[in-house]
Image (tube, rainbow, N blue to C red):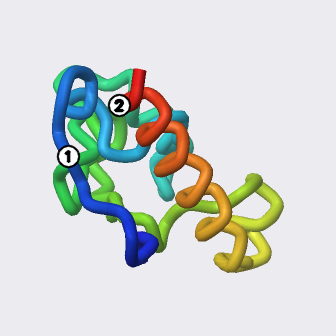
Amino acid sequence: MFPEDYEPVYEGDDFESRFPDITWHCDCCGDTLNDQENFDDHLPYWQCRKCGYLNMISADEIYASEEDYYNGIKDSHSEMMEQAVETRKKEKDR
């Protein structure tokens, strides 16, 4: 979930990435989704162009590390999301 005080504002490069500094990987084949043609993390799902797997794109799918992903530890995504939001706020204030 987004912090309560965050209001999404889409300006400048906000159209390019909903989740800044997050690299998305296919849950099936491991290919980097960000590098696939026309990838858009504003969509709720992305079909991998390499294997065809339908991947969920949401804050609930963000892990701090590959180890956390394999161990099913999702708690760490909230800290990363807060950092991403703070980065966006700082960029907006420039």
The dot on residue 30 is none
Residue at 20% across, 46% down: 9
Q: Amino acid at mark 1?
A: Val
The CA span between labels 2 and 1 is: 9 Å
Residue at 78% across, 76% down: 71
Q: Quadrant of the N terminus?
A: bottom left
The reply to whether callout 2 and callout 1 are in contact (CB within 8 Å) is yes
Residue at 24% across, 54% down: 8
Residue topped by disc 1: 9
Looking at the image, residue 81 sits to the left or right of residue 55; the answer is: right
Residue 78, by quadrant, is: bottom right
Image coords of residue 35 (percent x, y)? 39, 22
Image coords of residue 79 (percent x, y)? 67, 64
Residue 90 versus residue 84: which sits nearer the camera?
Answer: 90
Residue at 76% across, 53% down: 65
Residue topped by disc 2: 92
Q: Amino acid at mark 2?
A: Lys
